[in-house]
Image (cartoon, helix red, strand yellow):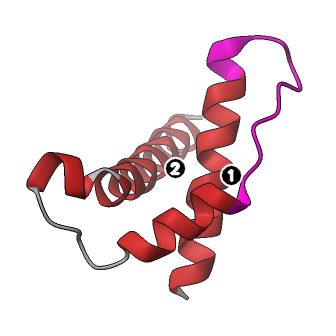
Amino acid sequence: MRRLILAGAYAAFLAVAALGYYEWTAKSPAILGTALPGWYASRAAEKATRWQRPTGLLVVDKALHEGEEAMRFYGLLR
């Protein structure tokens, strides 16, 4: 049971780190003053992802939307 909890915590950590890297890249011109490599992929992912509210809960919908953008971002980098 402990291994399952650790595996879940590790998976959650990786998901948060991946989403954080995507957001850092997407917001790099405003934060750093210059675009990081991959910024164009983040712009394309933002333009391709339409805002939807499938659950009606703003926090959940925002997390789903940002997750979808991040998946598109990593797909474009590949």
Q: Mark 1 points at which residue?
A: 68
- Name the residue type under label 1: Glu
Does residue 14 lie above or below 37 as drawn? above
Give how far across and how far down residue 56 sits, in percent. Answer: 83, 12
Q: Is residue 2 magenta?
A: no
Quadrant position of the C terminus in the picture: bottom right
Quadrant position of the N terminus in the picture: top right
Region in magenta: 48-60
Q: Do the residues labelled 1 and 2 touch (CB within 8 Å)?
A: no
Label 1 crowd bin: few (<14), some (14–19), many (20+), radius 10 Å: some
Pick the residue in front: 67 or 3. 67
Main secondary-structure element of the magenta-colored stretch: loop
Q: Name the residue under label 2.
A: 11
Mark earlier in primary sequence (1, 2):
2
* Farthest residue, direction bottom: 78
Q: Which residue appears at 59% of the width and 42% of the height?
A: 66
- Name the residue type under label 2: Ala
Query: Which label was assigned to residue 29?
Result: none
Give how far across and how far down residue 53 sits, in percent. Answer: 83, 25
Q: Tag count in the figure?
A: 2
Does residue 16 lie above or below 21 as drawn? above
Does residue 51 lie above or below 62 as drawn? below
Please, what secondary structure does the residue beneath circle 1 have? helix
